[in-house]
Image (tube, rainbow, N blue to C red):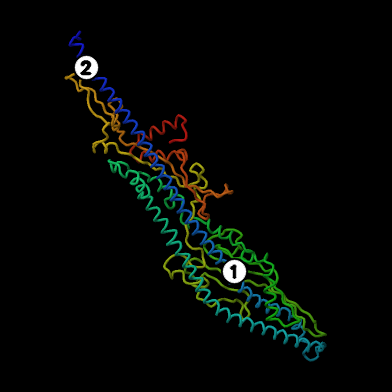
């Protein structure tokens, strides 16, 4: 029995439509599956870019921190050098003070000199008074000779020491210029040109038949690290390193010599042995000194600044004259104040001071250097850069303004890696075989219905929105963490910067900016809509 011809035709049509539907379903499955796979690939690339940029930032910050530590070490040693220079000046001021104390001790004997006049009624005091005055004069002469010997030794040692200190100062300045500045400039240029991102993208699409369809847009990272407004700030706006250096001086001889038990004892022993004739007794008492950085001498008690390097000492010198002869007083004492100051500024001017009071030969002792180089350890402009070698060199610090903004995670650098795959470019190159575009024309009088599974543009019902840019976003964060020191704020003094991936909610505004800058405003709208509904942990 044969089927009617009409029935056979309907069967063929149904069979054809079934095959067409199966083909469309298979193509849709392949298209959706490939796009999901490619979405996972672009997300992996975005994660790699975000983490790599965060890791690169952490490495640069750690390098800068190590350089800062080296500079702090240099400045701490420089503070010790300044303290030694000033303490040696204080030693010479103690010699001058000992002379002054001797002169005070001679006052009772000078008061008896009128007994040497005829008919004074106290002539028995004349000989012993003149003898005591002469003996004190010999002691003063011995102290002056001792000071002159020290002055010659001083000048012989000071010049080579100054040259070495100046070379160290140059090294510190060059470390900043060739190290921190050059390294950070190179880093910012690499971030701005997206070198790391481009390298990862190139590796990701190597071997792909659609070369160049993946691109990166991760310039949002540059705003987080840009000098002055980002995480790093020039030294002219910060005193962080100065405080750190002051806190790192450590040794009580540099910080508070009144707490250093042998400071006064060393001066007492030296002058007593080399400049005092027994049984006379000399003693250095009440010595107080420190080396620090400040705008004015204050023993680093407040107002610390990198304007000047300062070391100051002050105290008293006591002399007991024990060689008097009866009937004159056999013992007479005197006390004289003693002080020294080293003040070196960070520019070429005449305000630098290196002086001690009193001097053995004059009221005020000063070194013999010209005013502009007076214990700057060399001319500030010799290199044409930076500051005087004895003052804090240039540096970069963490932007302290961000430490008050917890919403911005205290200014710790974030980067949003936006990786996009351009399906429009793929379609122009031929596309995948399962990405079909055709029309169903069941009625010759109409345009039919378009079938398009390329994922380039939405249909007319949705405004024809361009969705050809497959977009993946990942968030990388460079954060500071020192083990067992959770309360320590981010800084560029300690090399404890790390990198990690984070959710977008570390900074929602930057996420929206990153999507808008990548010409996928619809993705930013979708993101904001999800956030408005309470979604967290995206993407």
Query: Which percent across, then down, holds residue 242?
Result: 54, 59
Mark 1 or 2, nearer chain start: 2
Q: Considering depth in this image, is 454 or 417 the residue closer to the camera? A: 454
Q: Considering depth in this image, is 279 or 485 the residue closer to the camera? A: 485
Q: Is residue 131 above or below residue 263?
A: below
Between circles 1 and 2, the one closer to the viewer is: 2
Query: Which percent across, then down, holds residue 272?
Result: 70, 78
What residue did someone put label 2 on?
Answer: 12
Residue 334 as seen in the image, left or right of residue 344: right
Q: Is residue 368 above or below residue 193?
A: below
Q: Considering depth in this image, is 1 or 480 the residue closer to the camera? A: 1
Q: Which mark is residue 83?
A: 1
Residue 393 as seen in the image, left or right of residue 318: left
* Residue at the extreme front of the image, as rendered: 1
Where disc 1 sits, the SS reads helix
* Residue at the extreme top of the image, as rendered: 1
Distance between the Cα atoms at labels 1 and 2? Answer: 104 Å
Where disc 2 sits, the SS reads helix
Query: Which percent across, then down, holds residue 482?
Result: 55, 50
Query: Which percent across, then down, holds residue 283?
Result: 71, 74
Please tell me which residue is depicted at 58% across the width and 60% down the height of the picture: 248
The C terminus lies in which quarter of the figure?
top left
Find residue 450 and report its image quarter.
Answer: top left
The N terminus lies in which quarter of the figure?
top left
């Amino acid at each position: 029995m044969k089927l009617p011809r009409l029935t056979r035709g309907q069967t063929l049509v149904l069979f054809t439509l079934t095959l067409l539907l199966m083909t469309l379903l298979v193509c849709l499955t392949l298209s959706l599956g490939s796009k999901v796979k490619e979405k996972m690939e672009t997300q992996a690339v975005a994660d790699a870019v975000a983490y790599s940029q965060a890791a690169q930032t952490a490495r640069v910050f750690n390098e800068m921190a190590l350089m800062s530590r080296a500079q702090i070490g240099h400045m701490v040693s420089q503070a010790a050098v300044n303290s030694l220079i000033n303490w040696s000046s204080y030693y010479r001021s103690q010699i001058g003070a000992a002379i002054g104390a001797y002169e005070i001790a001679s006052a009772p004997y000078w008061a008896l000199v009128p007994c040497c006049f005829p008919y004074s009624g106290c002539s028995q005091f004349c000989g012993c008074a003149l003898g005591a005055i002469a003996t004190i004069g010999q002691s003063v002469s011995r102290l002056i000779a001792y000071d002159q010997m020290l002055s010659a030794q001083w000048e012989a040692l000071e010049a080579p020491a100054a040259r070495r200190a100046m070379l160290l100062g140059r090294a510190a300045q060059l470390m900043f210029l060739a190290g921190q500045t050059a390294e950070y400039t190179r880093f910012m240029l690499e971030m701005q040109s997206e070198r790391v991102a481009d390298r990862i993208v190139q590796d990701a699409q190597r071997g792909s038949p659609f070369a160049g369809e993946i691109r990166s847009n991760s310039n949002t990272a540059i705003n987080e690290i840009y000098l002055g407004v980002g995480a790093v700030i020039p030294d002219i706006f910060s005193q962080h390193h100065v405080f750190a250096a002051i806190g790192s001086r450590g040794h009580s001889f540099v910080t508070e010599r009144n707490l250093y038990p042998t400071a006064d004892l060393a001066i007492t022993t030296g002058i007593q042995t080399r400049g005092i004739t027994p049984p006379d007794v000399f003693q250095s008492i009440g010595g107080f000194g420190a080396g620090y950085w400040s705008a004015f001498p204050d023993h680093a008690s407040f107002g610390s600044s990198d304007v000047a390097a300062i070391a100051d000492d002050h105290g008293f010198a006591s002399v007991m004259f024990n060689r008097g002869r009866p009937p004159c007083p056999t013992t007479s004492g005197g006390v004289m104040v003693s002080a020294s100051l080293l003040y070196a500024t960070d520019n070429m001017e005449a305000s630098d001071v290196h002086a001690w009071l009193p001097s053995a030969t004059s009221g005020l002792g000063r070194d013999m250097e010209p005013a502009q180089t007076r214990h700057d350890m060399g001319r500030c402009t010799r290199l044409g850069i930076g500051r005087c070698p004895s003052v804090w060199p240039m540096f970069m610090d963490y932007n302290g303004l961000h430490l008050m903004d917890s919403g911005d995670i205290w200014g710790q650098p974030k980067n949003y890696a936006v990786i996009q795959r351009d399906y429009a470019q793929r379609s122009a190159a031929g596309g995948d075989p399962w990405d079909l575009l055709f029309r169903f024309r069941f009625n010759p009088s109409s345009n039919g219905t378009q079938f398009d599974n390329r994922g380039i543009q939405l249909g007319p019902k949705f405004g024809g929105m361009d969705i050809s840019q497959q977009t993946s976003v990942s968030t990388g964060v460079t954060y500071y963490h020192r083990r067992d020191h959770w309360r320590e704020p981010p800084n560029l003094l300690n090399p404890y910067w790390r990198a990690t991936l984070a959710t977008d909610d570390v900074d929602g505004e930057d996420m929206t900016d990153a999507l808008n800058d990548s010409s996928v405003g619809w993705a930013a709208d979708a993101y904001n809509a999800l956030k408005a509904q309470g979604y967290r942990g995206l993407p």
